[in-house]
């Protein structure tokens, strides 16, 4: 009886380890595909970008959005370990370190832009269901994408006010969407 319990525990632990390893592999693959998408967009390689978007669309929306979390939660390490989501919140209050971190903010903006090549196609509902409206989802996605482009340009120019304004636009669109869809 004791041996059966140990064997059952071993099977459960083994299954759990395989699941965690597979999840980590998925997270790594998503991040790699997003970085490849950033490169394809920078080169204006539409065929490669479309192929990468199609590949990324196969993932759950939540898994794609996880790249904005802290590095502890497997998000991108762009500017410290706080993650893109928290950095956007901080920049929306005041961008004080644009001179030293402008290149990192530009990279972060390009990651956001790449993610929002995929997200508009991942609306959780097909038709309006109460407050959940695919049209509003698309509008918020467009605002984030526009904000990401503005953030990239502002960061490249090392313009703190424009960085803050772009981060505010991104943050507001994210908050509005998450109020309804999260």
Image (tube, rainbow, N blue to C red):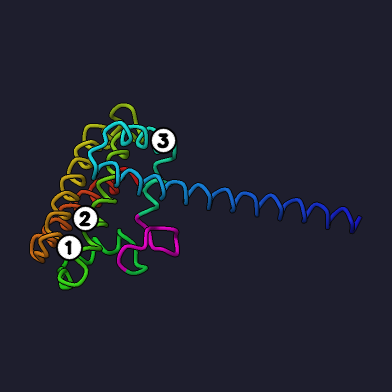
Q: Which mark is residue 55?
A: 3
Instruction: Measure how far apart labels 3 and 1 are at the Cα level.
Output: 32 Å
Q: Nearer the viewer, mark 3 or mark 1?
A: 3
State if disc 2 and disc 1 touch (CB < 8 Å): yes
Q: Residue furthest top?
A: 127
Q: CA distance from mark 3 to mark 2?
A: 27 Å
Residue that mark 2 sits on:
171
Q: Residue at x 25, y 63 (%)?
A: 104
Quadrant of the rendered image containing residue 85: bottom left
Q: Which residues are magenta?
A: 68-79
Residue indicated by mark 1: 92
Question: Residue 79, percent across and down?
Answer: 30, 66
* Residue at 27% in and 43% down: 116
Q: Is residue 132 left or right of residue 61?
A: left
Name the foreground residue: 132 vs 83: 83
Callout 1: SS:
helix
Instruction: Give the x, y percent position of residue 132.
Output: 29, 36
Decide if residue 10 is on the left or right side of residue 46. right
Please give left or right for residue 6 compared with residue 67 in the image. right
């Amino acid at each position: 009886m004791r041996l059966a319990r140990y064997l059952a525990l071993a099977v459960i632990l083994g299954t759990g380890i395989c699941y965690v390893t597979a999840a980590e592999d998925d997270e790594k693959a998503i991040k790699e595909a997003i970085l490849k998408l950033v490169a394809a967009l920078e080169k204006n390689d539409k065929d490669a970008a479309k192929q990468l978007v199609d590949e990324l669309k196969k993932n759950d929306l939540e898994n794609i959005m996880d790249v904005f979390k802290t590095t502890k939660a497997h998000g991108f390490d762009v500017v410290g370990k706080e993650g893109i989501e928290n950095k956007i919140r901080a920049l929306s209050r005041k961008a004080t370190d644009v001179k030293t971190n402008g290149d990192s903010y530009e990279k972060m903006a390009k990651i956001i832009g790449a993610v929002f090549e995929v997200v508009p196609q991942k609306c959780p509902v097909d038709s309006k269901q109460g407050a959940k409206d695919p049209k509003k989802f698309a509008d918020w996605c467009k605002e984030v994408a526009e904000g990401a482009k503005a953030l990239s340009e502002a960061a490249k120019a090392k313009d703190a006010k424009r960085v803050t304004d772009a981060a505010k636009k991104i943050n507001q669109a994210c908050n509005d969407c998450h109020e309804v869809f999260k």
